[in-house]
Amino acid sequence: MASILRGLNAISARLARVLTVISLVVTALIIPAEVAGRYLLGSVPAWSGEAAVFSLVWLSMMGAAAGFDRGYTIALTVIRDRLPPAWSRPTRLFAETFLLVFLAVLTCYGAEQTLWNWRQTSPAMGIPMAVPYAALPVGFAMMLLSLAEGIITSRAPKEGRNR
């Protein structure tokens, strides 16, 4: 089970990094072109603003998932550091369980919103609004998978781990 989860998480983390780079490139190309078009030509294509926003949504979620997998998370350890060593592990276990449930709820709710918006299309590009909405459940699921791997393999999840 742990080896399957490890393999899935490796694929997921790689995909998150690739999608982060693609979204960053798209954003880095569209936004300056929009600014130049607006000030030099006086107009921009209708789809460019929408594409930039959708790309930023995917960039944010994939970047968060890639960072989560590599251990770039905010951790409030002030309480855990002041506890006796015997309390450190149960505290970490509680925090991991809470985060696991939280990410599962966000994944499910994000998937529900994505499916709910499948028939709605974006005004300029005409694509289903499920495309930008899908970044949320996909990103949260990637984080959930990463956390589950860390818990199952009994290592401190994502503390300074690099892939």
Image (cartoon, rainbow, N blue to C red):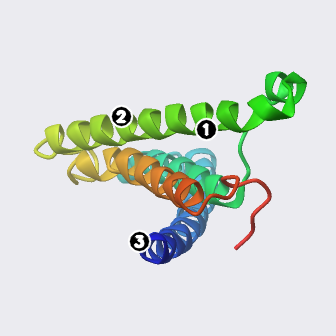
Find the distance from the CA under tag 2 to the CA under tag 3.
23 Å
Q: Nearer the viewer, residue 159 or 60?
A: 159
- Residue drawn at x 28%, y 47% is 124
Q: Nearer the viewer, residue 29 or 19?
A: 19
Residue 84 at x, y percent in the picture: 86, 27
Mark seen at residue 1: 3
Mark seen at residue 105: 2
Residue 16 at x, y percent in the picture: 52, 65
* Residue that numbered label 1 is attached to: 93
- Residue drawn at x 58%, y 31% is 94
Find the distance from the CA under tag 3 to the CA under tag 1.
20 Å
- Residue drawn at x 46%, y 57% is 145
Question: In screen coordinates, is 130 left or right of 159?
Answer: left
Counting residues from the start of the chain, the first of labels 3 and 1 encountered is 3
Residue 161 at x, y percent in the picture: 75, 64
Residue 45 visible in rendering: no
Can you tell which of label 2 and label 3 is closer to the viewer?
3
Q: Quadrant of the N terminus?
A: bottom left
Question: In screen coordinates, is 38 left or right of 67?
Answer: left
Q: Quadrant of the C terminus?
A: bottom right
Indicate the amino acid at tag 3: Met
Above or below for 8 versus 153: below
Find the distance from the CA under tag 2 to the CA under tag 1.
18 Å
Evaluate if marks 2 and 1 touch, with contact meaning CB atoms under 8 Å apart: no
Residue 127 visible in rendering: yes
Asked where in the image residue 29 lies, by quadrant, the reply is: bottom right
